[in-house]
Amino acid sequence: MARYFIQRILQFFLIIFIANSLTFLLPRLIPGDPIEQVLTMKAASMGSQNYDIQEYVKIYREKFGLDRPLWVQYLNHWNDLIRLDFGYSINEFPTRVNTKIVAALPWTLGFMSVATILAFLLGSILGAILGWPDSPKIFQKIVPLLMGFSAIPFYLFGLALIWIFAVKLRVLPPGGGFDPTLIMRFDLRTIGNIIKHAILPSMALVLWGVGAWALQMRAMMTSVLGEDYILFAYAKGLPPLQIFCKYAIRNAFLPQITNLAVSIGLIIGSSILIETVFSYPGIGNLTYTAISNRDYFVINGTVFVMIAAAATSLLIVDLIYPLIDPRIRYQ
């Protein structure tokens, strides 16, 4: 057991090391200078060409440490990463990256967590009913619909929902986290406005997730029904509802719980597409904007948060799963 724990923790740090090294290196391999790009765009937007941009580029490169050799930048990157200090945003200097991450993270955790858990509960219950042979036949007719839902990317659901509810019906906002004119306060009006803006992105994730969770649960129920303990329960004359709840669902749920733990760990990293479609002010949209602007330090900070969340979730699942399912052993 101790050997298994040590191996998994070493693998955890290896994942963090490799992933963050690639995150540092890949943006810097793209030709061009992001600081020169930012200063040129700002100068053009202000209509001012009376100063030497290259001189300012030189000053800012020195300020951000980008004038040093790549290996020195790499060592400084890890030195800052250990202290959880991601530096300043190139595109929005002097805003610190930590400030941007702290501001964006609650938006992603809020609607993504609710959507993931809601899709898990609805999909698992529906999948259990679909996999039970004594369930009403009408439920079997929705299997093709669920297969279609799980096959369609969730961002396409998002575009369809925007067209229906925002363009045609005009009952929900097409994007954003809140109204631009809203003064943020801790009151019912602010909370209601935030929830209203989160409905469409959450609905897109739930529609896609229900199909995927239901099909997985249906497959697990089908395999569980062939086990000896189910046949023994029938032979004892137990009521079908008791067999369904205490024997079938209880055992079929174990892989679902594992998948849920992994999904929760991946909600930060999987939010990029859906938040980009809805212009939602979360960590995914922040990452997309940073990649578009080649903001090295924001990319490093946001991707590190995604990697750390996913790796930690997988580590916790690996360590506690033998406690959840006694049939699993550390060997």
Image: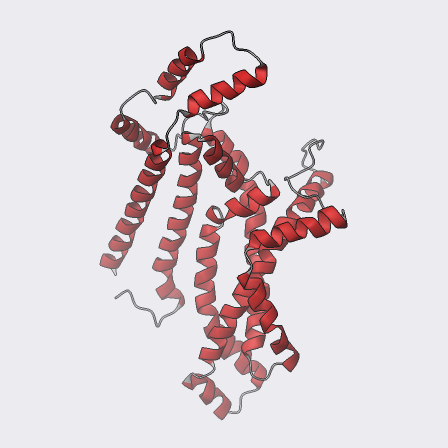
Viewed as shown, does residue 166 lie left or right of 130?
right
Residue 4 can be seen in this image: yes
- Nearest to the observer: residue 277 or residue 205: 277
Percent of width and height locating residue 112:
55, 50
The residue lying at 37 percent from left, 29 percent from top is 31
Residue 85: image quadrant is top left
Q: Nearer the viewer, residue 236 or 279?
A: 279
Residue 102 x/y as whole percent? 50, 35
Which residue is nearer to you in this view: 209 or 141?
Answer: 141
**In the image, residue 229 lies at what x, y percent?**
43, 84
Residue displayed at 45% across by 9% down: 52
Q: Is residue 48 above or below residue 328?
A: above
Q: For this view, does 87 lie left or right of residue 123? A: left
Taking the spot 66% from the left edge, 78% from the top edge, the residue there is 138
Residue 107 falls in image quadrant: top right
Quarter the N terminus occupies? bottom left
Q: How many marks?
A: 0
Placement of 183 over or under 265, stated as above or below? above
Left or right position of 100 against 73: right
Q: Is residue 245 above or below residue 204?
A: below
Q: Is residue 5 above or below residue 196?
A: below
Q: Please indicate, yes or no, whether residue 136 appears anywhere in the rendered image.
A: no
